[in-house]
Image (spheres, grey):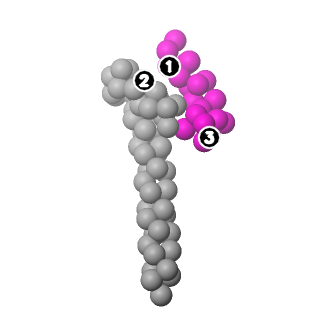
């Protein structure tokens, strides 16, 4: 019985942490697409995205690199 409760607790905590990670990605995207913000803020959001997602999702980092390059121009 105790093992079952422990397993359920671990699964719930893992689900919560995964949901938080997805929300952070979307909030960073909102920041770098907001043209009313300063460029330094937008570049910081892009760099934070790279640090958090380059290893886990390289395809999205590649697409973002193209946007980053256009923004830098």
Characterize the local packing of mark 3: few (<14), some (14-19) or many (20 or more) Cα atoms within 10 angstroms: few
| Chief secondary structure of the magenta portion | helix
Q: CA distance from mark 2 to mark 1?
A: 9 Å
Residue at (52%, 12%) from the top-left corner?
Answer: 73
Which is more N-terminal, label 1 or label 2? 2
Residue 43, x across and y down, in percent = 42, 23
- Give the x, y percent position of residue 37: 33, 27
Q: Is residue 45 visible?
A: yes
Residue 27 lies in the magenta stretch: no
- Per the rendering, the mark at residue 57 is 3
Label 1 Cα neighbours within 10 Å, binned few <14 / some 14-19 / many ≥20:
few
- Of the residues tagged 2 and 1, which is closer to the observer? 2
Q: Which residue is mark 2?
A: 43
Q: Residue at x 43, y 38 (%)?
A: 28
Residue under label 1: 71
| Label 1: which secondary element | helix
Residue 3 appears left or right of 60: left
**31 shown above or below 20:** above
Label 3 or label 1, whichever comes before in sequence order: 3
Sequence order check, earlier mark of 2 and 3: 2
Q: Are marks 2 and 1 in contact (CB under 8 Å)?
A: yes
57 relative position to 13: left or right: right
Q: Are marks 2 and 3 in contact (CB under 8 Å)?
A: no
Q: Nearer the viewer, mark 3 or mark 1?
A: 3
Q: Is residue 37 above or below residue 10?
A: above
């Amino acid at each position: 019985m105790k093992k079952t409760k422990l397993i359920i607790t671990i699964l719930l905590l893992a689900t919560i942490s995964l949901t938080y990670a997805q929300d952070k990605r979307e909030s960073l995207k909102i920041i770098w697409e907001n043209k009313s913000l300063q460029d330094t803020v937008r570049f910081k959001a892009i760099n934070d995205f790279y640090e958090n997602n380059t290893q886990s999702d390289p395809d999205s980092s590649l697409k973002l690199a193209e946007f980053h390059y256009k923004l830098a121009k």
